[in-house]
Image (tube, helix red, strand yellow):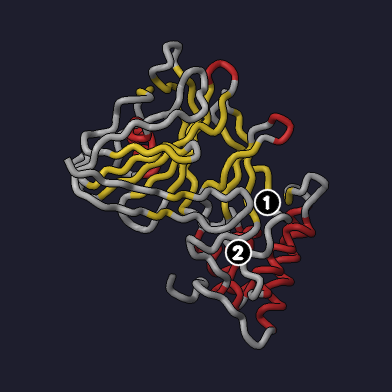
Amino acid sequence: MGRIVLGIGFLGVLVGGAVYLAILMSGSDAVVEEVSAVPAVDGLDYVDPACLWPVLDAALLPDAAPAPDSVPVHGCAPEGTLIHDEDGWVRIVLEGNLPDGDDAPRRTGARISFAGDDSHLVLETYDNWGGTGVFSTLLLGRLTSDGAHLMSLSAHPFGDRCNGGLAGTTGPDGELRITANMTPWDILISPLIGLDDEVQWAVGEQRFGTAFLETPFCAVCCSAVTREYSVDVAAGTISELGLRYNEQVPSSMPDNPLVSCLEDAVGHAAGPDALVAGAEVAVLSQAITDCAEAANSAPVLPSPAGRGEPE
């Protein structure tokens, strides 16, 4: 039998930066490959990403069936699927002929990022259906007593790479936190979050002028700022904490004064916990307006893939 050899690189960056999905293939018929052991959680080495498809579909696809009450942790990958383990990520690729009849390839990855009390688990996942988008979802659940199934699952969809995609998990002082990537444009419009899209667009153009149309927003335009969330694993809920500027990372676009200004604005507005939240939001809001006005008065506003340009 021929063999497909796949290497899928997925970089979830805690401190900003791009997230990439690279696929290298050769051969013809795929075979299921044993995964090497990743750190075990209550005896569970890994979760078969194909077992999570019904849950991910229900979270991401409007026409999907409701998510099941529980899913197996192993044995779901259809025939012809390659399973690959790399740096704790278990990745599967099925090149068409999916169980639902879809002929598009599907590439899914999952990793156990946190294990709490009473067999509670947190999994980071990503999904790709053959296009350029790599959509991430956070799954919170609990292992059954026999360790064979995940139950009490709650799915929290994030975005596509830099457009709000999962950037990783952290655990300061034992508290689980989730970070999500942000583009420079996400920083710019943060004072407008909560407005309807049409209102947001009208207000943004009026308030930020040319900068609103030209600030980078593409799916690989990660800024050095992330959005941070706390997680209640037992309750299956997440709560936004605020924005964080990652000082250890240089400006994502050092040649773009507007981007550097927006990133620095988050750092300067942050409170003692290095987050922008509560009263600091108003300080950041004014600083963002100042950045936009400075950019609009500059002779040239360098900006690849801004809102006024195609990606």
Report x, y in % for residue 5.
30, 46
Residue lying at the far bottom in this picture: please name it: 299
Question: Disc 1 and disc 2: Cα gap in Å?
Answer: 12 Å
Report x, y in % for residue 270.
77, 53
87 vs 178, left or right, is: left
- Mark 1 / mark 2, whichever is N-terminal: 2
User: Residue 41: in sight, yes or no?
Assistant: yes
Report x, y in % for residue 70.
38, 22
Residue lying at the far right in this picture: please name it: 272
Q: What label does residue 156 carry, if any? A: none
Instruction: Count the marks.
Output: 2
What residue is disc 2 on?
Answer: 184
Which residue sits at x=74%, y=63%?
265
306 vs 49, left or right, is: right
Which residue sits at x=43%, y=21%?
151
Report x, y in % for residue 11.
51, 50
Q: Secondary structure at mark 1?
A: strand
Residue 35, quarter of picture: top left
**Label 1 CA crowd tier, 10 Å (few <14, some 14–19, many 20+):** many
Residue 168, quarter of picture: top right
Q: What label does residue 243 carry, if any? A: 1
